[in-house]
Image (spheres, rainbow, N blue to C red):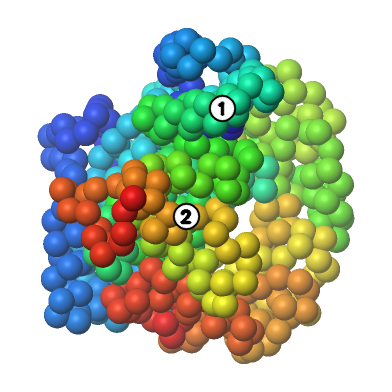
Amino acid sequence: MCIEDVCAIRNWSAFDGDASVNGTCVAHDLAAELQQQVLAALERGIALNIAGNRTKGFYGMPAAGRALPVSAHRGIVHYEPTELIVTARAGTTLDELESVLAREGQMLGFEPPYFGCDATLGGTIACGFSGPRRPFAGSARDFVLGCRLINGRGEIVSFGGEVMKNVAGFDVSRLMVGAMGTLGVLLEISLKVLPQPAAETSLALEATPENAHSAMLRWASTPLPISALAYDGRLRVRLSGAESAVVAARRQLGGEVEDVPSAFWTDLREHRLPFFQTEENLWRLSLPPAAPRAWIEGAWLLDWGGAQRWLRTSAAPAEVFAAARQLGGHATLFRSARPEFRFQPLPANLLALHQRVKRAFDPHRLFNVGRLGAW
Amino acid sequence: MDGTIPRHRLAEVLGRIGELAMDYGLRVANVFHAGDGNLHPLILFDAGQPGELAKTEEFGGRILELCIEVGGTVTGEHGIGVEKINQMCLQFGTAELEQFHGVKHAFDRGGLLNPGKAVPSLHRCAEFGRLHVHRGRLRHPELERL
């Protein structure tokens, strides 16, 4: 579900095509109209700024061009609970999608952050965001089975499909995850979904940062049914699975059982913890889980068992980028009031490769120019 | 063979493979991952019989086309290589194939790495005679077709 205490309760009742689902939201297939808009922009040489519901507009850099609204292109196209697959249009809200899945006892395994009630599936996939379950279940990219998109020549193209195993052609659908709309306009996305765990509980343990980090590394290599591991001054553990496994693991790990198992993890995922309420730069560092603590001055919060580290700091971006690189990962300036460059600078050869990939999909530089970098 | 199909169509596809086996006069042992719809039909043939290998390969191609028809893919695990390259012309349209070539060119500008494998050229699809036709218009009509 969405952010329950913020979003209005909705009764999403249908996933079949273009039906009205709650009297106000109507699902539409606008692929042909969007294609016409892209072709018109192509003809006139007008760059396009792909716009969902703008819940993630804070992320990355501003794109040039005229807005191309895509959120009306929405609706679940195909959902087959027995096959654990769903295909939805890019403008479908995560709220609707997760509500429909929940009714069948299923969920998006990558536990996507919303960052706003009207977050769309397309924006989520374009940003490539994954939540606390990511190291234990897989990332957004891992769950994408296929997609349909409009490329920069105005062609509607489809890659991948709705089957779990598929190695025909290059894995273009997963290339779209995190591409920030720079390669095309996502129209439909097919995802693998997962059954919800039968039981779930959350623990909080007192620990120093060093002890918490070593415990996270140790536990991650055990068969414990862990579905999230974080440290925010307390060591946080979520256990998900069969009731007997969760109970046994809870006894083994000890600590305090949280009253509402999902509360901390939803607040972490949505950046609603006090840690994230800051005027300083907020950085996301993606590091090997065992990497030592970086030497940057600031406040740290560890997620993903140590693989994703949030940093509040006023340190210079160059210093953070250099530290992340030396520790074997990369840094992203996730939120900032200043117009800084947000992404880890690429070596010249990789930058050139990114630019060539961009040209392969969008030779006339129509889509989201500048959102990820100078291309 | 290595096609993958939506799991709920397993029974239908196995039935149709059986019908094809009758048509071709060849036997098939259907080995498959029932859990994810990945089929590995083993076609039994006598390599000593003139023409039987060609007939077997054609039969295999028909099975892959059946996988595409029901919403699946021609390869779930093994990859395209050269054996299944013609069926790529059926699974993907020309725009997708051109996009694949564009991606390959971004990584391999000199065309050094396994040229001719994994993604068919449009010429090859034209020769295969099964190029996708979109909205009644054949792309690249200048290509010679056999």
Q: Earlier in the sequence, mark 1 or mark 2?
A: 1
- When the figure is inspected, residue A271 is found, relative to residue A223, above or below; the finding is below
Of all residues, the one furthest to the front in this rendering is B50
Q: Looking at the image, which is closer to me, A294 or B59?
A: B59
Q: Are marks 1 and 2 on the same chain?
A: yes
Measure the alpha-carbon separation of dots 1 and 2: 26 Å
Residue underneath mark 2: B120
The answer to whether residue A337 is visible is no
User: Neighbour class for label 2 at 10 Å: few (<14), some, many (≥20)?
Assistant: many
Q: Chain of mark 2?
A: B
Considering the numbered disc 1 on the image, is that residue within a helix, a strand or a loop?
A: loop
Disc nearest the viewer among 1 and 2: 1
The answer to whether residue A104 is visible is yes
The residue shown at (15%, 76%) is: A43
Considering the numbered disc 2 on the image, is that residue within a helix, a strand or a loop?
A: loop
Kindly identify the amino acid type of the residue bearing the numbered disc 2.
Pro
Q: Which mark is residue B51?
A: 1
Q: Looking at the image, which is closer to me, B7 or A132?
A: B7
Kindly identify the amino acid type of the residue bearing the numbered disc 1.
Gly
